[in-house]
Image (cartoon, rainbow, N blue to C red):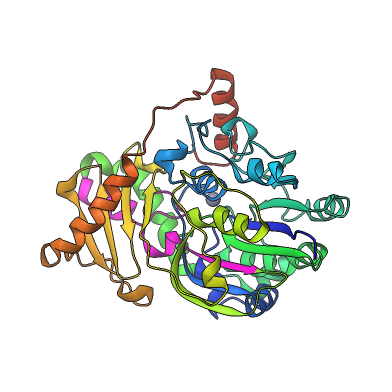
Amino acid sequence: MSAPNVLFLAIDSLRADAIFGDHIPTPNFDAYAARGAQFRQCVSTTTSTTPCFSSMLTGCYPPRHGVRGLQGYRLSSSVTTMAEAFGAAGYQTHAEVTGPLVPETGVLRGFENAHHRPGYKVKPFVWRDEVTQRMSSYTEPWMTLLHTWEVHRPYRPGPDFVRRWDKGGYEAMVAMSDEWLAPVLEAAGDNTIIVITGDHGEEYPDTRLGQKLHRAATKARKKFRLSKWFPYMDKKFAGMALGHGFALWEHLVRVPLIITGPGIAPVRVEDQVRHVDLFPTLADMCGVTVPGDIDGRSVKALIDGATLPEEPAYMEAVGVKLEGDRITAVRTPDWKLMRFKGSKDKDALFRLNGGSTPDEKHNVLTRHPEVASMLAAYMDRVLAAESEADSPLSESDEAVIEQHLRDLGYL
Ligand SMILES: [Zn+2]
């Protein structure tokens, strides 16, 4: 059979439990999971869109690819993108993206055809038929990145989805994505590897009461200037933040990962895999050469039912709400070490217990210093790859990115 095509579907803000849990009906995604490899413990690299995609598309952690936030960074010219590698191997490459993934960020480097569509003030999935139509004219073999914004706040579910599933809107949008994306996945054809993942997770109120409480807290913080008069209370209320980007808790970094296609037998993988592993894995499956100095590795062996030694995952939170105070972490299925404000004194170690029953409330660092120092050593190695920004943004590019972030409600 000729080289397989690749359809890489990245649903913005899609949590792992949205697909692998039972509380949202996703029959179409479930069908793909059942006939391919379903990775039950995939973690994202950051919790902000542009750095997330930079990691997925380069196999590198942020210190190496250089995109350390939504604003003010451009992808380093020293890394090779998935589009560049697949293009060099004879693939036609396409990007259908939205939200903050504007060309000025450098994230779309190497895509032969890149379409960026508006992510705000548009009806959900209005773009679908046009994109599906374009897919029918692709030349094989092709590799396509499809990024969707419908599961990102603010949620705008169609009326039938509100009636059936609405709680906060998030779950309705996941159900709607399952139904509306089915024809796009179908149109990809049999000789296509289909990847389904989320770029990061999400914090959302899953009851109407939760929504009301959140609205009241936001109002109170503003109206009574809590940060000035009652900083403790302000901190408490700020902890009720919704969305993503501001932390690295499990529901914000655990995403679903499904890989299905020609020659892939059904397999359920419980091992931890990372978004930086995606590029090398897909390249491995398609006979595409990857650059040597990347952070990820091919996990094709796991798809083939074999085993691999455990590898830790590095992650960092760089959201706008953190105002420059980055949070970094290293995760294994059993542990997560978090570092706040870049200071070792503020390290915290949490037990994840294999990922099934994580405890992110009790800091157990003093009881397990040897685990903490092992994870800290990995963090140091990742951070050592940090390079000076080699392709600074021009003022006009910066302005374009800022306007998009404003439109999307980030600023
Ligand atoms: Zn995102």
Residue ranking furthest to the left: 366
Number of marks in the rendered image: 0
Q: Is residue 257 magenta?
A: yes
Instruction: Please report the residue visible at 43 percent of the width from the left and 59 percent of the height from the top.
Output: 252
Instruction: Please report the residue visible at 65 percent of the width from the left and 70 percent of the height from the top.
Output: 175
Residue 65, above or below 159 = above
Task: Tell me if 168 is positioned left or right of 221 in this view.
Answer: right
Residue 330, above or below 57 = below
Find residue 357 and report its horizontal and vertical position in percent. Answer: 34, 77
- Image quadrant holding the N terminus, namely bottom right
Res. 68 visible in picture: no
Task: Tell me if 144 is positioned left or right of 76 in this view.
Answer: right
* Quadrant of residue 105 within the rendered picture: top right
Instruction: Please report the residue visible at 25 percent of the width from the left and 47 percent of the height from the top.
Output: 340
Find residue 411 and report its horizontal and vertical position in percent. Answer: 49, 36
Task: Tell me if 326 is positioned left or right of 203 in this view.
Answer: left
Res. 110 visible in picture: yes
In depth, the one of 402 and 353 nearer the eye is 353
Residue ranking furthest to the top: 395
Residue 173, above or below 227 = below
Find residue 255 and report its horizontal and vertical position in percent. Answer: 50, 64
Find residue 67 and report its horizontal and vertical position in percent. Answer: 47, 37
Instruction: Please report the residue visible at 34 percent of the width from the left and 75 percent of the height from the top.
Output: 354
Q: Is residue 363 magenta?
A: no
Magenta residue span: 230-259
Residue 383, above or below 256 = above
